Image (cartoon, rainbow, N blue to C red):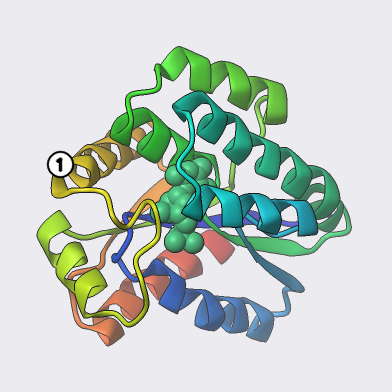
Amino acid sequence: MRGKFITLEGIDGAGKSSHVAWIADWLRARGRDVLVTREPGGTPVGERLRELLLSEPMDLRTETLLVFAARQEHLAMRIEPALAAGRWVLSDRFTDATFAYQGGGRGVPRAALEALEQWVHGGFQPDLTLYFDLPVAVARARLEAAAGAPDRFEREDAGFFDRVRTAYHARAAGSSGRIRIVDAGQRPDEVKKQVEEVLLSFCE
Ligand code: TMP
């Protein structure tokens, strides 16, 4: 039987990545064979594209094409083979991030993104997406408190992240229930509880 594809989304600083490991363990404890991966990245080519995307200034269309190039590689080399083998795939970001960041944040026309999405993955979508929602000011405060230099996206201003967040909300509203909104502003154990409830009903 084909596996399920679960993705995590959120603006930078929303804390989604800190939930990846326990979600994978939670699914494994229920008998699923889980592949944990991320975008941009997840393959040797994708990880090199990630380095470029997070550090090099570049033309907006180049940026958009590179996230889809990394995604094509990811789908062909890792996601599709894993799902076909019955494994579950848990990816930290996927195409919703492109609609939010390149579309909402940077203003790439939706029609262009839809054309690339269609070319790279046709009607294929995640089975479930957990969107970690947090007000921009709170997310930025978390980023500032974090160690390490901010990357090219994390250095964007609050207006950019407001547009990204708005785009995520619009996408969730039009997703027919695929995208589940998690209130990431609560205590970590509360956030975990929300995620667990979504996972329980998804796995039933
Ligand atoms: P991460 O920090 O969650 O690993 O994601 C890396 C950055 O890449 C994040 O700031 C969002 C950005 N990104 C896009 O702009 N478009 C995309 O399609 C993806 C997958 C990520």
Neighbor class of circle 1 (other Cα within 10 Å; few <14, some 14-19, many 20+) is: few
Instruction: Please determine whether, in this image, residue 1 is positioned above or below residue 105.
Output: below
What residue lies at 71% left-to-right and 71% top-to-bottom?
A: 34
Tell me where residue 177 sits by quadrant: top left
Instruction: Please determine whether, in this image, residue 163 is positioned above or below residue 193.
Output: above
32 on left or right of 202? right
What residue lies at 21% left-to-right and 80% top-to-bottom?
A: 145
Q: In which quadrant will I find the N terminus?
A: bottom right
Tell me where residue 68 sits by quadrant: top right
Instruction: Please determine whether, in this image, residue 124 is positioned above or below residue 157.
Output: above
Depth check, front residue: 172 or 15: 15
Q: Residue 132: percent from the left, percent from the top?
A: 32, 60
Three-letter amino acid code at the position of disc 1: Gly
Check disc 1 and report its element: helix, strand or loop.
helix
- Observer able to see residue 129: no
Q: Residue 184: percent from the left, percent from the top?
A: 25, 68
The residue where tag 1 is placed is 159
Report the residue that reaches farthest toward the top.
111
Tell me where residue 116 sits by quadrant: top right
Depth check, front residue: 37 or 69: 69
